[in-house]
Image (cartoon, helix red, strand yellow):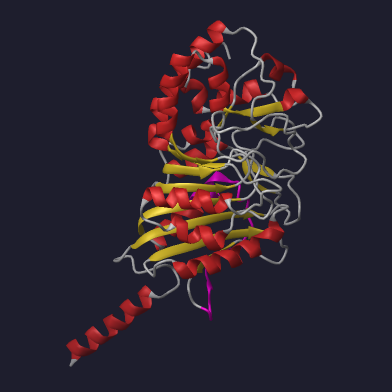
Amino acid sequence: MRHYIFSFVCGLLLLSACSNGDGEDSRHPAKRTVIVYMAAENTLSGSAQSDINEMIQGVKSISKYDNLIVFVDRASSTEKPFIIHLQDNDKQPADTIRKYEQDFYTSDPEKLKEVLGWVMTNYPANDYGLILWGHANGWVIMNDVASSRRAIAVDNGKNIISDKGLWLEIPSLRTALEALPHSFKFIFADCCNMQNIEVAYELKDVTDYLIASPAGIPGDGAPYDKIIPDLFNYDDVQMYTKTCDDYYAKTDEENGHLPISAIRTGQMPQLAAATKTVLKDIYDTHTDIDTDGLIYYYTYKVSDPNEKTMYDMNDFIRKYAEETDYNNWLNAFNAAVVYKKMSKKWQVQGTLVFDFDVTEERFGGVSMFFPLERYEHTLIKYNKGIREMAWYHAVGGSELGW
């Protein structure tokens, strides 16, 4: 009798442990856990709930063996950061699994690491995906006091609708992700200007794929009702092609589609080596680099043409490399950039002038920074900031005199 009671009590304790809101049964990992890191304590706060609602629709099409976990930090004086588990449950589609007692900067790499690590511990899976949601401007590091140093995930620290705050730089993002117990199958950056070769190289050891746009994205972000099922596709090729296709199809022809691509990060060392070779020849041969007419994706100050940067990597090298050198480089590029969707124009908000033509031959879907003398006189000291990126060293930036 005592043995029966002991077994019964143990059984109740086990059931309680498996449904205590701190995660799924760790003995049976999910097939995939996707984590959304929603940095919305800024001017994007008003878009957070609509995207969560789209995610709730999208999660209806994923397997019960999958997890979609969303960390949320919005600009609200009455709300602290929290984590929700989205599920196909009409009565409770968003289950709050963690509430933080204190506000904090989502741009703090230690907090990012803590949040993602907590989810990995409590919602274990065979593999993981990460969605970076929020503002960004790729690898670019601001050096003016007013804007602070930045790259992604701005948090103003005051729970107000403002982008004047602290940002997370890409090398700090990489360091935080490297410290996690697991790497990612993919990182989908639903942020502006994140498909830089510099970002992809920085993240090459923490994710298999980087899916992002080199351009500015629509203000309301990705169509998550469609993209969430795509990201839970276990066929890698289907996963990144469907994600790119569905985001591309979001915008209409009048305003253009979103240029977007997928990079297989395991090919980054080979692409870096090929780029180092071709850049040496380019900079040895051409003393005057003319970027007029080249495809570019970013400018900090529209009124100053010298601020144009983030040039399309393929377009630049195609223009300046010898044909044989370019074709050899292109083989390495195509092995890394495994999928891309081109648009002749895309939606912008006063930050770009389309004084260039986009063609299939020119479009690479990935930007790269090419140090130029003119950047010594711009508001942002790009030539200095690029030296903080691992890509700069991988392609022999110092040897090229950058």
* Image: 176 above or below 278: below
Q: Residue furthest bottom?
A: 1
Residue 53's quadrant in the figure? bottom right
Foreground pick, 29 / 114? 29
Task: Indicate left or right for 104 with 228 as reference.
Answer: right
Quarter of the image with the C terminus is top right
299 up-or-down from 112: above or below:
above
State the image coordinates of residue 208 (x, y, percent, origin top left).
Answer: 40, 42
Residue 103 location, quadrant: bottom right
| Image: 19 above or below 180 | below
Residue 371: image quadrant is top right
Marker count (numbered): 0
At horizontal 34% and vertical 69% (from top left) the residue drawn is 25
Please provide percent x and percent y for residue 38.
Answer: 59, 55
Q: Is residue 400 visible?
A: no
Residue located at (62% from left, 26% from top) = 385
Residue 186 place in picture, x, y as percent: 44, 47
Is the N terminus in the top left, top right, bottom left or bottom right quadrant?
Answer: bottom left
Q: Residue 333: image x %, image y %?
A: 44, 29
Is 98 a magenta residue? yes
User: Residue at 64% of width from left, 38% of height from top?
Assistant: 344
Res 174 visible:
yes
- Name the side, left or right, on which 156 lies relative to 285: right
Q: Which residues are magenta?
A: 90-113
Q: Residue at x 73, y 33 (%)?
A: 300
Q: Nearer the viewer, residue 91 or 226?
A: 226
In the displayed structure, does residue 10 sit left or right of residue 58?
left
Residue 212 lies within the magenta run: no
